[in-house]
Amino acid sequence: MEKNKLNNLKLMAISLLVGLVSGLVVGAFRWLIGLLQSYWLYSFRLVHSNHGYWILIILGLLLTGLIAGYLVKNEPHAGGSGIPEVELQLQGKLQLNWWNILWRKFIGGILAIGSGLFLGREGPSIQLGAAVGQGISSKCSKTNQRVLLAAGAASGLSAAFGAPLGGTMFVLEEVFHNFSPRVWLNSLTAALAANFLVSNLFGQHPVLAIPYNHSFSVNLYWHLLVLGVLLGIIGRIYQCGLLNGKKIYAKIPLPRWLHGLIPLGMLIPIAYFVPQVIGGGNQLILNWHGFTTIEILFLVFLLRISFSIISYDSGLPGGIFLPILTMGALLGALYGMIMVKLGLLPRVLIVNLVIFSMAGLFSAIVRSPFTAILLITEMVGSLLHLMPLAVLALVAYLVNDLLGGKPIYESLADRMEHSNIADYADNVDQLTVSIFENSKLADKEIKDVAWPSKTLVRLIHRGAHDIIPTGKTKLLAGDLVVLEIDSNARGCIYDQIKDMQK
């Protein structure tokens, strides 16, 4: 027992190191993206007075597309958000060279996101953190490698958003799909370390410090139901668009690695005429009240949702995390302004809907309601209005579910898995699975379960106790079951156990 405690402390110390290094990497990533975006905005302001700058802008964006595309061409998994890759790595279905991912994602992400495309830094930050965790854990056991990879992913999101709790919850709820104490404890340690470092670099103010002091009274909760239905439907449309956008790109007679030139070319008129809407959307969320009419706000939303899909499906490094929150904020503002015009909502409550809708749309598209609630609470920096925020997140989630929506990152990972046969690790490995409430495995004795081939039940974590099982040991909801497996079949066994519980 003392040895286990010592090993746990050692793992936590390594997680702390992962968090600090991830914070340093993602902090530099954030800073350089902001610097590059400021340069592009300045360049587009200059072109209004001196048209000679057009040549420099066109050449600059062309070079951006060529460099970022070439980086992805030689390492396809450095493109996109990176979250599907991290999911597959944690499931044992994908093996990546962490250094190749780290430097290519870092440079390619700065170029693509910093250009002003509608891409977010959060997904790439998660993959950067995961790469750091993978690199630092290279000499650890395979089980600890996955724990540290998850810790790196959590620290990446924490550093990107200044949200250690949201970062930890996202990894547990959406990426790792496991609430193992070893995972959440080390993920939280790394996330707190990353947030500490980044806070000292960028300050301790919330990323989306939107003041809202008026309570959303219960008699107005019907707005949350109506808005939740709208967000669920829009979320499903966005999911379909994102998953099918690559089919359109495939019909364009250009090599895949050059597809990024298309959104970069489309960015030029957008940045020239409406520079305030470019980028991931952080400033747009903070300055949503700058759009004074419903018609303009609606057009901005249409631009954001369509160009977000075009930007992401081009394959350039960049995520959809912040773009989703931006679209949610715009929808909340749009709905609020319409209701105010109809005399059904006080104007001071529009800002409430802006904040609630960010959580609602994120919950609908990503299908991670707990993460949505925690993340928006941390980003805004207020715990005052959790109830309406949670209600809207739940309604949007349920509507999207009824429409057949699936978690977007899981859907992207499934497509990646089917199109790219992964390399697997080798030798004996361990897999920890949770026995969920209403699982078909709950209340069954171990001997009565048709376990996958080459699978041995080694240990059961039940509350604060560890149980060495026998064939007659009954599985209970809430148990964490440690399986010894053939590492070559880890991904297949993971899927089989998941199906067995349904």
Image (spheres, rainbow, N blue to C red):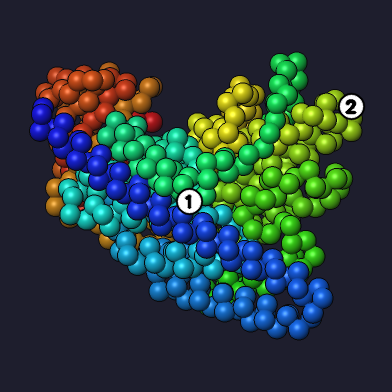
Above or below residue 425? Residue 366 is above
Image spot of residue 65 (x, y percent): 56, 74
Callout 1: SS: helix
Tell me which residue sits at (70%, 54%) in the image.
304
Looking at the rendered structure, the number of numbered marks drawn on it comes to 2
Name which quarter of the figure residue 422 lies in.
bottom left
Above or below residue 382? Residue 255 is below
213 vs 304, nearest the viewer = 213
Q: Residue furthest top?
A: 219
Tell me which residue sits at (75%, 73%) in the image.
46
Image spot of residue 490 (x, y percent): 25, 47
Closer to the chain start, of discs 1 and 2, is: 1
Q: Residue furthest right?
A: 342
Left or right of 415? Residue 45 is right
Circle 1 residue: 201
| Label 2 Cα neighbours within 10 Å, binned few <14 / some 14-19 / many ≥20 | few
Image quadrant in which the N terminus is located: top left
Amino acid type, callout 1? Leu
126 vs 235, nearest the viewer = 126
Separation of disc 1 and disc 2 at Cα? 45 Å
Residue 7 seen by the camera:
yes
Image spot of residue 75 (x, y percent): 40, 69
Res 343 label: 2
Image quadrant in which the C terminus is located: top left
Tell me which residue sits at (17%, 23%) in the image.
466
